[in-house]
Image (tube, grey):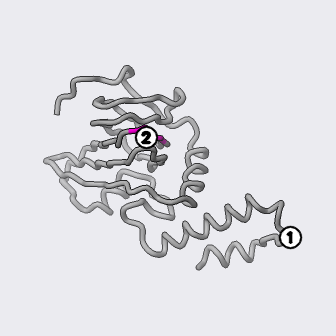
Amino acid sequence: MQLATQCNFEIIGQATDKDKVRALELKLFGMPQANIVTTHTFLPGVYERKIVAPPWTVLTGAEHKVPYTVRLESGTIAVTTDEGVKVLTGPCEFKAPAGTQRAGRVFEEEVVWVDVYENPDDCQDVNELENRLYVVPEYGLADNRTDEQKVIIEAMVYLDRLKTNQSQMTYQYTPVTVRYLTAI
């Protein structure tokens, strides 16, 4: 696909602070979840992962193990980069290095965002591709979370809320409580 517009910078680098992206992700887990639709396309030697995010969605992505190409097909989104937050409007395309993890906020139109990866063995097993391409956290990736991973998220959100409200509570959670909650 040939795009009419190129982003005004060649390479968007790594997110400014992965810890901040992960902290945002934890807060987002405690909120109503947007209906982000993911589709997978397999072409000879290529794997494409497309997401369609509704207007006003705030989202985070997984950390990438390999370099890849991003094709923003439509919409406007603010994303974190090593140069700060950039506002991108599709269509545009750019290269992203390994180690990239982003947070973003969609504006008034849905965003169609496609990550394009080399896939020399034409693997079509999404779980296998995720393990090759991403640093998969213990709580999994959105599309393929197991029930156990969903419980981990619930425990993380619960512990975060306890921590946030700790000054208002007389109960202090202990390492034993933490182990119990994360073992559920």
Q: Residue farthest to the top? A: 8
Q: Residue farthest to the front? A: 108
**Where residue 172 sits: x, y (%)?**
82, 70
Give the residue displayed 40% in from the left and 44% down from the top. Answer: 55
Q: How packed is label 2: few (under 14 Cα within 10 Å), some, or many (20 or more)?
A: many
Q: Are marks 2 and 1 in contact (CB under 8 Å)?
A: no
Query: Where the C terminus falls, by quadrant?
Result: bottom right
Q: Residue farthest to the left? A: 44
Give the CA distance from mark 2 to mark 1. 39 Å
**Where residue 96 sits: x, y (%)?**
38, 35
Q: Amino acid at mark 1?
A: Thr
Query: Where the N terminus falls, by quadrant?
Result: top left
| Residue 172 in magenta stretch | no
**Where residue 41 sits: x, y (%)?**
20, 51
Q: Quickly name the residue at label 2.
A: 106
Give the residue displayed 27% in from the left and 36% down from the top. Answer: 73
Which contiguous range is marked in magenta?
A: 104-108
Chief secondary structure of the magenta span?
A: strand
Q: Amino acid at mark 2?
A: Val
Task: Pick whichever, 168 or 50, lies toward us.
Answer: 168
Give the residue displayed 25% in from the left and 62% down from the top. Answer: 125
| Residue 106 in magenta stretch | yes
**Which circle marks residue 170 in the picture?**
1
